[in-house]
Image (spheres, grey):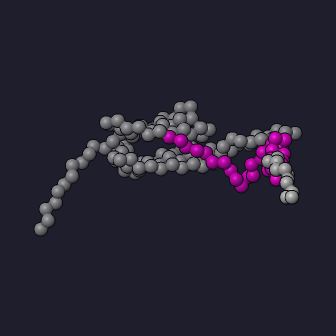
Amino acid sequence: MANLTRYSPFDEAFDDLFKGFFVRPVAFDEKTQPKVNIRMDVTENDKAYVVHADVPGVKKEDIHVTIDGNQVAISAEAKYQREQKEGEKVLRSERSYGKAYRAFTLAQEVDEAGAEAKYVDGVLELTLPKKAATSATTLSIQ
């Protein structure tokens, strides 16, 4: 007769996986910094593109927007400021800091002179007017 063993998903390997998970706080290593994420929506109408980008926790001085023809790039840096009073120890730190970069290409070139940027409540709003379309020139072949 074959020996039967009882299987339990809560064996020692499973216990080791979660050992101390609910007891000890999680600490991030200084080398593995969380990154700032830039999430955005891009809409278009007849005259302009409108970009709404979420850049929470970043000062407007630390946001840079570059426009080159139909290419737009947004970069931001959230700086980590640690204030620790004497006698305190950090149990958990989850606030994001670091650098982020997003670049995208639009279907039509942007008029850089008329472009506007606003930053309110962690949302960057870019209004990027379209350049007037130039008519194509047909060349005759000799």
Q: Going by the picture, which residue comes out furthest to the front?
A: 1
Compared to residue 47, the image places residue 72 above or below, namely: below
Which residues, given as a range, are shown in magenta? 13-40
Q: Is residue 136 magenta?
A: no
Point 79% across, 48% down: residue:
9
Residue 16 in view (yes/no): no
* Quarter of the image with the N terminus in it: bottom right
Q: Position of residue 51 (x, y in %)?
A: 45, 39
- Which sits in the foreground, 44 or 58? 44
Point 12% across, 68% down: residue:
142
136 on left or right of 63: left
- Which sits in the foreground, 108 or 99? 108
118 on left or right of 13: left
Point 59% across, 38% down: residue:
56
Residue 52 in view (yes/no): yes
Q: Does the magenta stretch include residue 18?
A: yes
1 on left or right of 133: right
